[in-house]
Amino acid sequence: MINIFKMDFHRFKTNKMIYLLLLLFFAFQIFGIYMLKKYEEPGGNGGMLISTMNESQFIQVIMAQTPSWMLVYIAVFSVYFYMSEYSCGFYKNYIAMKNARMYSVLSKILITGLFTLCMFIVMFVADMIGRSLFFDHAALGDGGYLAKLLIGQFFLHWAFSIVILCISIISKSLIASIVVGFLLSLNVFGMVISAFESLVGQVNLSSFLLVNTIVSPRDFHHINDLMHIAGVAIVFLLLFSFIAVRYKIKEDLG
């Protein structure tokens, strides 16, 4: 497991594509804040102006927008990192090792978590710089609330990266995985199910969907919201990790 993770981590830290994705995300996050300032309108949280929001409020407003560009970047990375190894056949160098298939998937789950963490760090830094430059206001707000928000969203986004990794492992197709990842980032499936629920009535299963949970503003002081986020993140993280590992173990690698 450790040796496989070391190989994946080496690929991660030496791959220029990762740094390009992070740089692009940083640049577009700054540009997005500039555009928000230029065309500022009252956002969520009781119709507050975005320029007066603290970081917690600002993050929730940004994440409620669709498509979620953070999810798009995470999807692109998750597909690229897996398929770059699969398409070149590099996995055949170690796949004969005992439990190598399981360890290979677990290693990539850790790497997608590392990339997700990098995305959150870049987002936070870009928010601070962008809000300071264009809003002249970069208040953090309640530190405890912000920490719960970032931790909760990190695990939700990590779970999303594992869903995309699982899709990549099963489909073995770069294009198909990217398309599905983009559709999920647009929350197409969540909107369809929500529309169906509005017709049926008295059903609210869509609130337990992963992307719906990510884009829906929550009160992180409220225990029910915290439990909901933790429950959704844990279920999706464990379920799709299990599916990915089981499929890889039984996969005919040719």
Image (tube, rainbow, N blue to C red):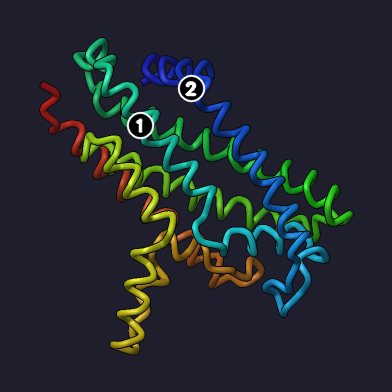
Which three-letter amino acid code belongs to the residue tagged 1? Leu
Residue shown at 48% from the left, 22% from the top? 12
Residue appearing at x 33%, y 64% in the figure: 189
Camera sees residue 106: yes
Residue at the spot x=70%, y=47% of the render? 31
Q: Residue furthest front?
A: 38
Q: Residue furthest top?
A: 93
Please give left or right for residue 219 compared with residue 15 in the image.
right
Q: Position of residue 109 (x, y in %)?
A: 40, 35
The residue that mark 1 highlights is 106
Identify the disc placed on residue 202: none
In the picture of the structure, the residue carrying the numbered disc 2 is 12
Q: Please name the amino acid that badge 2 sits on.
A: Phe
Q: Is residue 203 above or below residue 235?
A: below
Residue 40 in the image: state x and y as whole percent: 75, 66
The number of callouts visible is: 2
Is there CB contact under 8 Å for labels 2 and 1? no
- Comparing marks 2 and 1, which lies closer to the viewer? 2
Q: Nearer the viewer, residue 203 or 99?
A: 203
Residue 76 relative to residue 90: left or right: right
